[in-house]
Image (spheres, coloured by chain):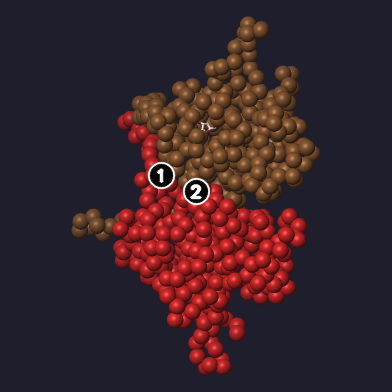
Chain colours: A red, B brown
Amino acid sequence: PTGGGKPKPPPVARYNLNNVTITPNPLENRENILLLTPMARFYPEYWDNLLRLSYPHELITLGFILPRTKEGNAATTELQKRITKTQKYGPEKDRFKSIIILREDFEPPLTSQDEAERHKMANQKIRRAAMARSRNSLLFSTLGPSTSWVLWLDADVVETPPDIIQDLARHDKPIIVPNCFQRFWNDEKKEMDERPYDFNNWQDSPTALDLAKEMGPDDILLEGYSEMATFRALMAYMHKEDGLLHEEVPLDGVGGAALLVKADVHRDGAMFPPFAFYHLIETEGFAKMAKRLGWQPIGLPNYKVAYPLALTI
Amino acid sequence: PTGGGKPKPPPVARYNLNNVTITPNPLENRENILLLTPMARFYPEYWDNLLRLSYPHELITLGFILPRTKEGNAATTELQKRITKTQKYGPEKDRFKSIIILREDFEPPLTSQDEAERHKMANQKIRRAAMARSRNSLLFSTLGPSTSWVLWLDADVVETPPDIIQDLARHDKPIIVPNCFQRFWNDEKKEMDERPYDFNNWQDSPTALDLAKEMGPDDILLEGYSEMATFRALMAYMHKEDGLLHEEVPLDGVGGAALLVKADVHRDGAMFPPFAFYHLIETEGFAKMAKRLGWQPIGLPNYKVAYPLALTI
Ligand SMILES: Nc1nc2c(ncn2[C@@H]2O[C@H](COP(=O)(O)OP(=O)(O)O)[C@@H](O)[C@H]2O)c(=O)[nH]1
Ligand SMILES: Nc1nc2c(ncn2[C@@H]2O[C@H](COP(=O)(O)OP(=O)(O)O)[C@@H](O)[C@H]2O)c(=O)[nH]1
Ligand SMILES: [Mn+2]
Ligand SMILES: [Mn+2]
């Protein structure tokens, strides 16, 4: 009701999925990117890195989901401070198209973000099922009809090449992942060094498939645990110092630290299973589901993104 | 660039999933409904029925997806005509909050909407996988952070009680389906009659589970084919003329003709598998996936919605 005058009719939007292109030249075609980050902790370097992205910010929508913990509250506050600074007071070219912040509506299964606790094998299934639910909530609530690409970027990825979106999209793959490294102080070499970190990017092995066959319907395979040697080929170890930057390898499992997905892959139904899906869960289950839908994930062993400095050595 | 003045900063939306309620009293709590319809054919009676819904239209967003066929083009034109009439020239109370129309970006596997052709068992797996992809595209592109409920309503559902949203929500179930009937001319009784129509709402049987056990990983169970007798308990046959209107039965498989889903079920990751998921596909696979996520589907055998008059008897 707008007083006396005739009220404006509600909007009728008409979108045509065929008009939304998903091409190797997203910049030229002004394609919309949805950049999604589940965030338990706020790293200032994460935001600094976002600001350095060379893809036009006016084509990037940011989506966040944070847990309802003390840590999540603190991260939300920090995140909002930086958002206001950028969107309200920053240079126009820094500002993103729009930003959506979601808070989880379930209790997180683990309250500790302590690395040792987080990575304990017994905790992994519960933890990763919860992570899968967070990713799905974020994805289902933010993907729109005009999104061309979804870039998943974890909150602890603090350094990517500024051209990462253009670089990855250029491969024209449904799902593509760079290699993640963690910087640390190498006390032997007495210099800064880096080591492989993300063990969710892998190619399947007969051993892993055999292990899966023996499992109960709800059991899951986990990577990077000596108790469960899978002998999968890990992309983390495929990196070659003198290799081609854009070398491609096919993958059967992917991690979510940095992951570019054509929006149509998600629209087809590919999500992050919070349950055992072919004995895989979360991002690894996503890769399997995408494959079932006919989309082959690809990894770039020599294209690197960086995690924060290791706190403990 | 807006000339000389300082440009307005882009919007920063902050949503809090916890503030979006999903309650048995959606009307009182002004909860947003997303009404989704895959549409191959436009029935004027479908739109007339939408207009009769008593739930405040300003809280209902409509989403459609139509195939890229001659029939789909014709349906799009008809639909747009009725939309313009309602949204632009109709009474304010008739107008919906917003409307999104998507066109499929893949070729439909079958071009014929002829009923016999559509229902041939050999065609079902391909057809239903395509339907699942359509439903997922529609869902992933339209579900927003402020959606409380998703009402799936097929384009050939031409009659529902006007209070259907309130009536179904009142049960406070994650997934709830009414019973679908088809009207026809009963030549024996010489009067209009109705017969059960939707065979996707069922309770599992030991026979069906045994059949599934013998199947290859990509095979699916189908309901309503004498070639594959499942002995499942079909909700279609549970209807009692003198039964309680709101009687509930638990279900293991559901159809999509009319289906009310709490948005959190979808946000958790429950979608329409276009592949064999526990030997189920599309809406039946959705029910199974929801169950795996801990959400129990419920059917209302005595609460009826109607399909169009049968063209052939
Ligand atoms: N929303 C949400 N995000 C989380 C939660 N736990 C971790 N994260 C974020 O999810 C991403 C992956 O988690 P992380 O703990 O780094 O997993 P790891 O890389 O496997 O050790 C990071 O961006 C975290 O900040 C949680 O409970 N809720
Ligand atoms: N977008 C889209 N919708 C379709 C297609 N085929 C059927 N539909 C719609 O999907 C719903 C279910 O299809 P229908 O043919 O009625 O299936 P049935 O009830 O199992 O016979 C109806 O609303 C149809 O109008 C298709 O190829 N694309
Ligand atoms: Mn991490
Ligand atoms: Mn139908």
Across and down, in percent, residue B27 comes to 56, 35
Chain of the residue where label 2 is placed in the rendered structure: A
Q: Is residue B170 left or right of residue A53?
A: right
Whether residue A206 appears in this view of the structure is yes
Q: Is residue B144 visible?
A: no
What percent of the width, then of the height, locates residue B267?
Answer: 57, 49
Image location of residue A153, percent across then percent down = 49, 65
Q: Residue at x 70, y 75 (%)?
A: A226
Residue carrying label 2: A267
Which quadrant is home to the C terminus of chain A? bottom right
What is the crowding at mark 2: few (fewer than 14 residues within 10 Å), some, or many (at least 20)? many
Which residue position is annotated with label 1?
Answer: A17
Mark 2–mark 1 distance (CA, rounded to whole Å): 11 Å
| Kind of residue indicated by mark 2 | Arg
**Among all residues in the image, which is located at the extreme right?**
B206
Would you place residue A35 above or below residue B268 in this image?
below
User: Left or right of B286: which side holds A147?
Assistant: left
- Please tell me which residue is depicted at 54% across the width and 80% down the height of the picture: A195
Position of residue A242 relative to residue B170, above or below, is below
Q: Secondary structure at mark 2?
A: helix
Q: Dot 1: few (<14), some (14–19), or many (≥20) neighbours within 10 Å?
A: many
